[in-house]
Image (cartoon, rainbow, N blue to C red):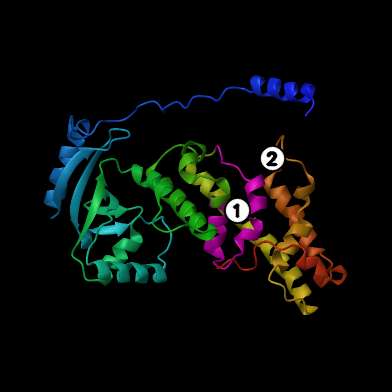
Amino acid sequence: MPANSRTARQVARKRKAPRRKKTSPARRGLSPVQTGEALPDSARALAAEVEADGGRVLAVYREPLGGHAVLFAALPLEKVQPTPYQRDLSEPHVKRLVSAMERVDRFLDPLIAVRHEGSYWTPNGNHRLAATRALGGQTVLALLIPEPEVAFQILALNTEKAHNLKERSLEVIRMLRGLVQTRDGTELDVAPLLEEPAFATLGAAYEKRPRLSGGAYHPIVKRIDGFLDEPLSEALSIREERANALLTLDDAVSAAVNRLKARGMTSPYIRPFVVARINYLRFVKPGGAAPEFDATLEKLTRAAERFNAEKIKESDIQRVGGPAEPEGE
């Protein structure tokens, strides 16, 4: 090997940046001993209410991350209900839970609950609740939160069963309806609870058309939708109007799909294909002001109405791929 080549490699190795030392994250939260100290009066008052409701407080502590009070309680099953704004039950999931709980003969995964007008709402335990009822149980164990408003935030931590687009969208629009009844302020104020503005619009559309193939429209709605700096009640009305505009587009797309099917095309990708063909936004680079919602849907609807099925070949559709229609909705 030539000496000059070897020297060049050695110099390169010497100039290599040193490895960064790993740093530990800053320590935060409570120590194990501190979780049982300095319990707030609100927790003690809630404990008295639980006992009066026929429940039993098994422990009171401060959760270790933020130091917030939590009650570990046994609650009468008949007094616990799911929050009215969460997703619908999945019967197959309930059956799986019933089978698993019967096998182990134990209830080991507490719900999260908040007290509401003498009863209890669970934002994340609807399936476990239904399974316990199916087994004839009398009691459910719950982590009881003193602050009722946390019920909205807990949905973000719900890992009991993975959401699909329809479930999450319905959950968000129901949550928005609940917030209208319980809070002042604008939709923008509660944006972290709703996660994504497109979910609210799609949720209102799913309520009107349960078998909507929302996955075909989600990328478009996500790009042109935004949280509204309007009072919650007015924002809800706007969501209804946007849902109606989306359904008008869906009607036009469905008519185009039917024209393709009439020509003998049977691919499961027909709807995504039509939506992709009329979606002029794919030629518009992201950045700058978002396209206006109503004007965009009107333009897309007109494009769907003019869609010429005679010019389409089966091979054109097969090249699209993507989510098939419908997406289990």
Residue at 80% x, 26% y is 2
For marks 1 and 2, give the CA distance: 19 Å
Q: Are marks 1 and 2 in contact (CB under 8 Å)?
A: no
Magenta segment boundaries in residue numbering:
200-229
Closer to the camera, 50 or 231? 50
Vertical position of residue 232 compared to residue 20: above or below: below
Residue at 65% x, 63% y is 323
Vertical position of residue 40 compared to residue 232: above or below: above
Percent across and percent down for residue 98 are: 31, 70
Q: Residue 290 has which mark?
A: 2
Residue at 53% x, 60% y is 166
Task: Name the magenta segment's main secondary structure.
Answer: helix
Residue 201 among magenta residues: yes
88 on left or right of 282: left
| Figure quadrant of the N terminus | top right
Disc 2 marks which amino acid? Ala
SS state under label 2:
loop
| Figure quadrant of the C terminus | bottom right
Disc 1 marks which amino acid? Glu
Vertical position of residue 194 compared to residue 95: above or below: above
91 on left or right of 199: left
Residue 217 among magenta residues: yes
Indicate the quadrant where residue 174 lies: bottom left
Q: Residue 241 has which mark?
A: 1
Percent across and percent down for residue 19 are: 55, 25
SS state under label 1:
helix
**Does the rendering let one see residue 201?**
yes
